[in-house]
Image (cartoon, rainbow, N blue to C red):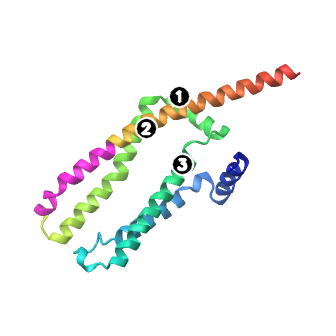
């Protein structure tokens, strides 16, 4: 695929959904993921109650939602247009520590309700809070993994955006120098 075709596909997708309303697409992908989880029988009392066709369709929907989420993230992560670079300059002024702290905070606030909801489902299925807490070590371990992943992703994202910012600044300097030399 040529660079021009790739840029036009990004332009079409951003025309379809402006950057400030991209959360709608993320919610749609999340809804499909939850539908796939439901089809997989995660909310059923027993997996024996769920047909094979429903399990396979749920797996396909979850995989499709995962791919859709990855594509949305890929499109959002590495665009170096002037607006994004100006926004990154403001984030950059606040510093790396603040950026990482906010990423960890987002990871916490996005994952905590999911785990609380899962413990509530365990309690609802068993009718005993003690048996729900017996499996809570798994949720705590997953929660800690998500917090660590938020930290790691923030560090990697900071480095990638810094490289993009420097490349963009160098491009602007080179184009300004070329424009001055032609005059």
**Residue 156 lies in magenta, yes or no?**
no
Taking the image as shown, residue 37 lies to the left or right of residue 169, namely left
Label 3 sits on a secondary structure element that is helix
Reading the image, the residue beneath label 2 is 154
Residues at marks 1 and 2, CA–CA distance in whole angstroms: 16 Å
Residues at marks 3 and 1, CA–CA distance in whole angstroms: 25 Å
Label 1 sits on a secondary structure element that is helix
Reading the image, the residue beneath label 3 is 74
Mark 1 and mark 3 in contact (Cβ < 8 Å)? no
Q: Earlier in the sequence, mark 3 or mark 1?
A: 3
Q: In front of the other: label 3 or label 2?
A: 3
Taking the image as shown, residue 159 lies to the left or right of residue 112, namely right
Residue 5 or residue 23, whichever sits in front: 5
Q: In front of the other: label 3 or label 1?
A: 3
Residue found at the far front of this picture = 1
Residues at marks 3 and 2, CA–CA distance in whole angstroms: 15 Å
Counting from the top left corner in percent of width and height, residue 32 is at 45, 67
Query: Quick one: label 2, few (<14), some, or many (20+) residues within 10 Å?
Result: many
Depicted 21 relative to depicted 122: above or below:
above
Residue found at the far top of this picture = 181
Label 2 sits on a secondary structure element that is helix
Counting from the top left corner in percent of width and height, residue 69 is at 48, 56
Number of the label disc, if any, that sits on residue 93: 1
- The magenta segment: 130-147
Counting from the top left corner in percent of width and height, residue 144 is at 27, 44
Depicted 174 relative to depicted 106: above or below:
above
Taking the image as shown, residue 77 lies to the left or right of residue 14, namely left
Depicted 81 relative to depicted 131: above or below:
above
**Residue sitting at x 13%, y 58%:** 134
**Residue sitting at x 50%, y 59%:** 68
């Amino acid at each position: 695929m040529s660079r021009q075709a790739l840029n036009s596909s990004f332009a079409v997708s951003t025309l379809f959904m402006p950057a400030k309303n991209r959360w709608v697409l993320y919610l749609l992908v999340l809804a499909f993921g939850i539908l796939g989880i439901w089809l997989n029988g995660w909310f059923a009392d027993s997996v024996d109650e769920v047909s094979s066709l429903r399990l396979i369709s749920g797996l396909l929907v979850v995989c499709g939602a995962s791919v859709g989420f990855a594509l949305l993230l890929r499109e959002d992560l590495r665009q170096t247009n002037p607006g994004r670079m100006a926004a990154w300059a403001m984030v950059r002024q606040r510093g790396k520590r603040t950026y990482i702290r906010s990423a960890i905070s987002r990871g916490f606030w996005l994952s905590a309700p999911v785990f609380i909801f899962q413990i509530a489902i365990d309690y609802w299925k068993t009718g005993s809070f003690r048996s729900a807490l017996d499996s809570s070590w798994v949720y705590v371990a997953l929660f800690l993994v998500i917090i660590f992943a938020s930290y790691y992703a923030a560090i990697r994202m900071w480095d990638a955006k810094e490289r993009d910012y420097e490349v963009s600044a160098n491009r602007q300097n080179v184009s300004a120098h070329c424009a001055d030399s032609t005059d």
